[in-house]
Image (cartoon, helix red, strand yellow):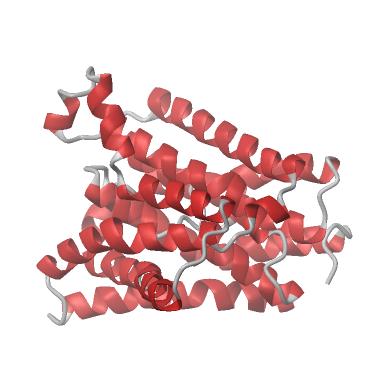
Amino acid sequence: MDSFIYSLNATVPVFTVMIAGYIFRRIGLLSEEFVTVANKFVFKVCLPCMLFLDLWSTDIRHNFDGKYIGFCAVVTLISILTIWGLAKLCLKDKTEVGAFVQAAYRSSAAILGIAFIQNIYGDSGMGPLMIIGSVPLYNIFAVLILTLESIEESIRQERGRIKTTCLGILKNPIIIGIVLGILASLIQLKLPHMLEKSISYMGNMASPLALIAIGAGFEGKKALGKIKPAVIASFIKLIGLASVFLPIAVWLGFRDQKLLALIIMLGSPTTPTAYIMAKNMYGDDVLSSSVIVLTTLLSAVTLTVWIFLMRYFGFIAG
């Protein structure tokens, strides 16, 4: 029962804020212009600040565990490349590929991961190590995939120009935030308290503002047209990846906080930032928002099942 409460505490507020955004738009409190501006602001300012803070606050040198971080990175890389390859082969509508791949692999690792581990163990434990191994790859490949699979005609024409694509990736605000965060952690950068607080305010706005924008921009009729790929992506995100890789993690000896962090990495709902990036990089934002809504709604059940199973077999204490 406690696992179910943990899941509800993490997912219900997320879903509620999205619903609030949807209602605010329908009653005229929010406009289409607000949604557009909010998406750009989150993408260019709030998300980079959040990623910078997440990585900067993680003592990479002190907490480094090569086996665990390596496992997180390898699993993330295999998941991304496998889903990308299958999507390109199986999806009839190729304009959906970028959004489908991103939504199917990209977890709310940084936000939900820390929250779940703290709920059960009282501290963030192995969460930061999981973030180091997965979150940079999540974002780097999201930028790469959305760039290469963009439905924007002008970008289609640039695909053959490797230099343009590489420059676009290097100039991406998400990548810049990640690189700066890792460097700041490695050199143990000390920021003035006022500056740290200011960046924190910006970063803290990322998730709630993204959720409001998702709800306000959600188009039910269009989403129904994307229901099949949305359901498939949601299955992969909540059940498929965890079914494949959790047994391997158990076999390798990962337990307790490490295993719980892996459950979050593999089986938590799609992060709201997937919608923001799809919207700003000419991906299929309707499909992205549909998967986020579905995975958020269903994850209270699926995450509870995964945690229950790991506890039942004695792989997670607490």
262 sits to left or right of 92: right
Task: Give the residue displayed 18% in from the left and 24% down from the top.
Answer: 158
**Residue 314, quarter of picture:** bottom right
Q: Residue furthest right?
A: 314
120 sits to left or right of 311: left
Task: Give the residue displayed 82% in from the left and 63% down from the top.
Answer: 311
**Residue 245, quarter of picture:** top right
Quarter of the image with the N terminus is: bottom right
**Residue 53 location in percent, x, y?**
47, 63
**Residue 179 location in percent, x, y?**
44, 46
Task: Give the residue displayed 60% in from the left and 60% down from the top.
Answer: 58
Quarter of the image with the C terminus is: bottom right
**Is residue 67 among the parts visible in the rendering?**
yes
Q: Nearer the viewer, residue 188 or 163?
A: 188
**Residue 267 location in percent, x, y?**
60, 53
Compared to residue 167, the image places residue 220 above or below, namely below
208 sits to left or right of 255: left
**Residue 71 location in percent, x, y?**
70, 39
Q: Nearer the viewer, residue 164 or 241?
A: 164
**Numbered marks: total:** 0
Compared to residue 57, the image places residue 23 above or below, namely below
195 sits to left or right of 218: right
Task: Give the residue displayed 75% in from the left and 54% down from the top.
Answer: 259
**Is residue 219 among the parts visible in the rendering?**
no
**Residue 192, quarter of picture:** bottom left
